[in-house]
Image (spheres, rainbow, N blue to C red):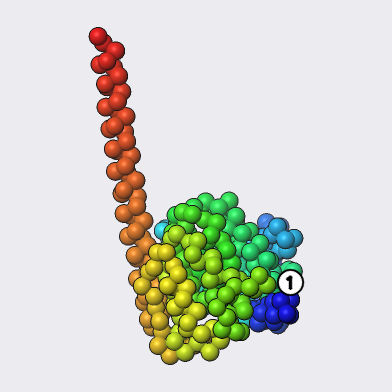
Amino acid sequence: MGNMTSTVAAKFAFFPPEPPSYDIFKDGSGDGKIYFSGVTGADKNLDVHLLDTKAGNKIVATFWRYPHARFTLLYSHGNAADLGQMVDLFIELRAHLRVNIMSYDYSGYGGSSGKPSELNTYSDIEAVYNCLKSDYGVVQEDLILYGQSVGSGPTLHLATRLPKLRSIVLHSAILSGIRVLYPVKMTFWFDIFKNVDKIRLVDCPVFVIHGTADEIVDWSHGKRLWELSKEKYEPLWIKGGGHCNLETYPEYIKQLRKFIVAMEKQQKESNSKKKVGMTVNNDVTEMKNNKCLRFGKK
């Protein structure tokens, strides 16, 4: 029963587009740079990576750079899309939110090798995060994780491992794989993407976006994830929104921008407190040193 249900959940979770909607290639110049088909012109603010994962797969990742961006969004897409289908959205988000966007195709999606699985998505997002650290110097405090649908699984997996993360966005997220299929109240060992348990371990602000008419992942999933969040940000319930069309509603980009501004304000306040704390500590140290000097002159 457990293996059968887990298999059913896995089949529900992964629908890689066939054939892939894009190609990656090198231009033959010998510089080793990778290019991405479907992008108009040579976007100088787009980097394409082919990353090795600890599971032995090679995955495609794209970094959309916004000049002088304060934050980087690590975007984990939904179950029936690949990077080629996301290009227009990433260009729009980069412009309106003024952030860098790093996204990737799961193993078995698009130009990424291997087969889709829960564990592979975890290895995938870890490899992408390591790239952000090593190639772009991104620190946790400047990173926002964004998980759409099944992408909420790897998003929350990584979030539980980053205690200084700036924030998370959960878009049409799932409580768990089995809960999408059956209205169960407990977590079974054979379930996949146990977000209902992992959300309790996240300490940063959580912004939940969900459509009230979602025909695939019921609205109750988003509401419960928001309720279980430690640090709740005002959710966005899009009236009449489905599972794959929330980006078409004007309040989507408006509220996302509002959220980014709130995170920028939070970061400034946090940095100000750190500076005040450093000043106080320095003053205390100086006072202690002065007392020691005076005590030494008896």
Q: Nearer the viewer, residue 130 or 157?
A: 157
214 shown above or below 78 = below
Residue placed at 59% from the left, 73% from the top?
Answer: 187
Residue placed at 68% from the left, 72% from the top?
Answer: 190
Residue hosting label 1: 115
- Residue 249 x/y as whole percent: 42, 85
Residue placed at 44% from the left, 87% from the top?
Answer: 212
- Residue 285 x/y as whole percent: 32, 29
- Residue 77 x/y as whole percent: 57, 74
Quadrant of the rendered structure where residue 27 is? bottom right
Quadrant of the snapshot with the N terminus: bottom right
Q: Secondary structure at mark 1?
A: loop
Tag count: 1
Residue placed at 34% from the left, 52% from the top?
Answer: 270
Q: Is residue 1 rendered to the left or right of residue 255? A: right
Pointer 1 local density, CA inside 10 Å: few below 14, some 14–19, many at least 20: some
50 shown above or below 134 = below
- Residue 70 x/y as whole percent: 41, 58
Quadrant of the snapshot with the C terminus: top left
Quadrant of the rendered structure where residue 54 is? bottom right
Q: Is residue 275 rendered to the left or right of residue 188? A: left
The answer to whether residue 141 is visible is yes
Quadrant of the rendered structure where residue 111 is? bottom right
Q: Amino acid at mark 1?
A: Lys
Q: Nearer the viewer, residue 187 or 223?
A: 187
Q: Nearer the viewer, residue 124 or 254?
A: 124
The answer to whether residue 39 is visible is no
